[in-house]
Amino acid sequence: MIIFDGVDIQSVANVKIEDILVSPVEIVPTVRARPIAPGSFFVRNAFGSRTVSITFAIQTENKAARHEALMAVSAWAKTDKEYKLLLPGYPNFYLMAVCTGKPEPSMRQWWESKLRLTFSCFDNPFWNSIIEKTAACGSSFFVAGDAPPLMQITRTLSAAASDQTYSHSGQSMTFSTIPAGSLVIDLNKQLATVNNVSIMQYYSARSRFLEPRIGTENISGTGTVVYRERWQ
């Protein structure tokens, strides 16, 4: 079962999956060259992208049927943006990926079993939990995983509120005004919106956006923390 954007590949063409290779998340080091001495100073590591390679076969000698199957698979593997990708063996997780490589079929070897699809995860290279969890602001909750979670603070305001602060672990962020409506503070994107309109003009310059972290957390303020755990 390989499901991309809600559609199983087996539902669009009769393909035989040969193998699925999921690369680890790329580690991108930042280093600073020494001006005179040999070597470099290590600064930090950052996470880059990851790829998923799917090799498959189309077991039909009929050229027309084979062409139709390849066209259906190519249309299924969308290239316009990243979609949810579910793979066998990972029933509780998904990746966000976009197709970056299409099959190169042989016109002669209809029996070939090395047709390949390549998917890349750029914006979010981690395994995401299918289950999204919630916790009330002001209460302790535990975030599992080994990568920073996807985390938002949500709240519905019937009237505008002034001087609203959210804080944890010595960090705090303050908004001078939050208009009435549906508030979403995306801690990963460091963006606050009400009814999908940015309210960053009300964000205090002395504030510091809270960082999504793993472990036991407690975010003070008014609202609901919505988070999705992630793994490398």
Image (spheres, helix red, strand yellow):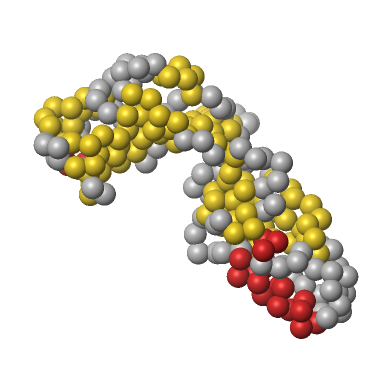
Q: Nearer the viewer, residue 225 or 117?
A: 225
Residue at the (53%, 24%) spot, across then down: 144
Q: In this view, does 201 lie to the left or right of 47?
A: left
Horizontal and vertical percent for residue 112? 86, 68
Q: Could you say which quadrant of the image residue 67 lies in? A: bottom right
Instruction: Count the numbered circles shown.
Output: 0
From the image, which quarter does the C terminus lie in? top right
Q: In this view, does 126 lie to the left or right of 117?
A: left
Give the farthest residue toward the front: 11
Residue at the (33%, 24%) spot, across then down: 136
Horizontal and vertical percent for residue 24? 67, 40
Q: Is residue 62 visible?
A: yes
Q: In this view, does 117 lie to the left or right of 106?
A: left
Q: Could you say which quadrant of the image residue 115 lies in? A: bottom right
Q: Nearer the viewer, residue 196 or 205?
A: 196
Q: Is residue 208 above or below residue 189?
A: above
Residue at the (81%, 64%) spot, across then down: 57
Residue at the (63%, 31%) spot, across then down: 38
Q: Which of 51 and 177 is in front in this view?
A: 177
Q: In this view, does 110 lie to the left or right of 175?
A: right
Q: In this view, does 34 lie above or below 13?
A: above
Horizontal and vertical percent for residue 40? 59, 31
Q: Could you say which quadrant of the image residue 207 lies in? A: top left
Q: Is residue 49 visible?
A: no
Q: Is residue 43 above or below residue 124?
A: above
Horizontal and vertical percent for residue 158? 14, 37
